[in-house]
Image: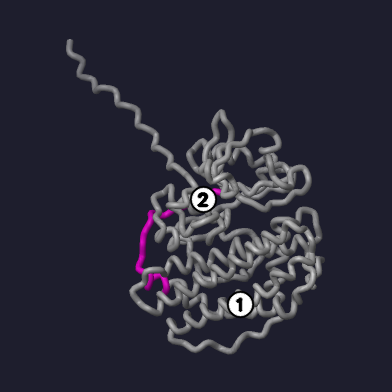
């Protein structure tokens, strides 16, 4: 008797998870260090987008947002909404990071990478391990196996592909007080630079003018260039390298290669301002090693130079827009001071009344 029953179907192969890497050749503007243009958080988001097929121009256009260098609102953490994706943060209190470990393990098992902003007190090898509950760095966890937790880390050796593997123990699980998932990744799409300019520049004009005024007020009225509390200076490098520089850098690259000269000029001015912001941020990083409040006076004039560079960008944006720049806004620097102290609290303020720190 002939068996006419259908042959059993082969098991449907599980889709292969994307490969994630910190690859300077594929990354946007990574020439010498991971902080070339983007910080540790955005390099992690970028690596996820590259894993989904994004190229350099698509990365810039998928992550660029209207300029708002001194962000309004109560959220002092990193940018979380991009044209290309959404980053959803899951936060736990100090000492409760282990409650989030199941979320990390489940995401990695499903093939989804996880951005970790670990509590340095519990993080293996951290400069603050066993000393302070500081959240000052981010890495991308992309695999969990018998070897341990596989990470991409811009501070890891280049010769090892910016990769680290750490043992999973109680301390590491406790460090997971801040984790983020990169979700809703859209298919990569490259748009004409002129289209991107129309989407981003009009709403950036007033915000950038206000931000310049805030920087001028901070330089001239809030901080006179004297001693600056070390933790506030650390918060300043977070603000500059984690937000101000990346916004300018992404805008410049998103508009690069435009056919219209006025858009090309905006692109170049944005990249010039991003370079000036990088100089300020890296100078602050270098000064941190002295752990002395007085050394930060060296960085004081860099704030004025950054504001000058932003003036050039604003002028090019108004020329593109065909409008006259309104008179400079009057401000006392309260917004940028609040933002700076907020960033300091977010990264270094566990249990510390930082709102009472005076900037003089």
| Secondary structure state at the residue bearing disc 1 | helix
Q: Is residue 352 above or below residue 313?
A: above
Q: Examine the rendering and report whether any part of residue 114 can be seen.
A: no
The magenta region covers 181-197
- Nearest to N terminus: mark 1 or mark 2: 2
What x and y, as percent, mark residue 277? Answer: 59, 68
Q: Are the residues at dot 1 and dot 2 in contact (C-beta closer than 8 Å)?
A: no
Q: Is residue 184 magenta?
A: yes
Q: Quadrant of the N terminus?
A: top left
Residue indicated by mark 1: 307
Residue indicated by mark 2: 182
Q: Mark 1 or mark 2, which is nearer to you?
A: 1
What x and y, as percent, mark residue 223? Answer: 75, 74
Q: Is residue 188 magenta?
A: yes
Q: Examine the rendering and report whether any part of residue 147 can be seen.
A: yes
The structure's colour scheme is: one colour
């Amino acid at each position: 008797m002939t068996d006419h029953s259908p042959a059993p179907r082969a098991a449907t192969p599980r889709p292969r998870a994307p490969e994630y890497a910190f690859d300077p050749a594929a990354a946007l503007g990574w020439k010498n260090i991971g902080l070339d243009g983007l910080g540790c958080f955005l390099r992690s988001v970028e690596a996820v987008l590259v894993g989904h097929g994004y190229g350099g121009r698509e990365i810039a256009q998928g992550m660029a947002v209207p300029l708002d260098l001194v962000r309004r609102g109560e959220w002092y953490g990193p940018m979380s909404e991009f044209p290309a994706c959404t980053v959803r943060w899951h936060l736990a209190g100090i000492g409760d990071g282990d409650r989030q470990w199941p979320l990390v393990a489940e995401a990695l098992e499903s093939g989804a990478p996880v951005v970790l902003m670990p509590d340095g007190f519990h993080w293996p090898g951290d400069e603050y391990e066993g000393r302070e509950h500081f959240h000052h760095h981010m890495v991308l966890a992309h695999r969990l196996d018998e070897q341990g937790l596989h990470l991409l880390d811009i501070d890891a050796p280049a010769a090892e592909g910016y990769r680290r593997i750490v043992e999973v123990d109680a301390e590491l699980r406790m460090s997971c007080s801040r984790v983020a998932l990169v979700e809703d990744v859209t298919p990569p799409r490259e748009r004409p630079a002129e289209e991107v300019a129309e989407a981003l520049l009009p709403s950036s004009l007033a915000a950038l003018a206000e931000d310049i005024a805030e920087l001028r007020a901070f330089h001239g009225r809030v901080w006179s260039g004297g001693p600056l509390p070390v933790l506030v200076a650390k918060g300043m490098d977070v603000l500059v390298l984690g937000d101000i520089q990346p916004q300018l850098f992404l805008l410049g690259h998103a508009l690069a290669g435009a056919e219209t000269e006025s858009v090309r000029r905006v692109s170049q001015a944005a990249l010039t301002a991003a370079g000036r912001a990088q100089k300020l941020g890296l100078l602050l990083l270098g000064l941190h090693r002295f752990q002395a409040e007085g050394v930060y006076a060296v960085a004081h004039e860099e704030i004025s130079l950054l504001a000058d560079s932003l003036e050039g960008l604003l002028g090019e944006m108004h020329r593109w827009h065909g409008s006259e720049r309104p008179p400079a806004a009057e401000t006392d620097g309260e917004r940028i001071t609040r933002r700076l102290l907020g960033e300091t609290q977010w990264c270094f303020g566990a249990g510390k009344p930082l709102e009472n720190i005076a900037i003089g």
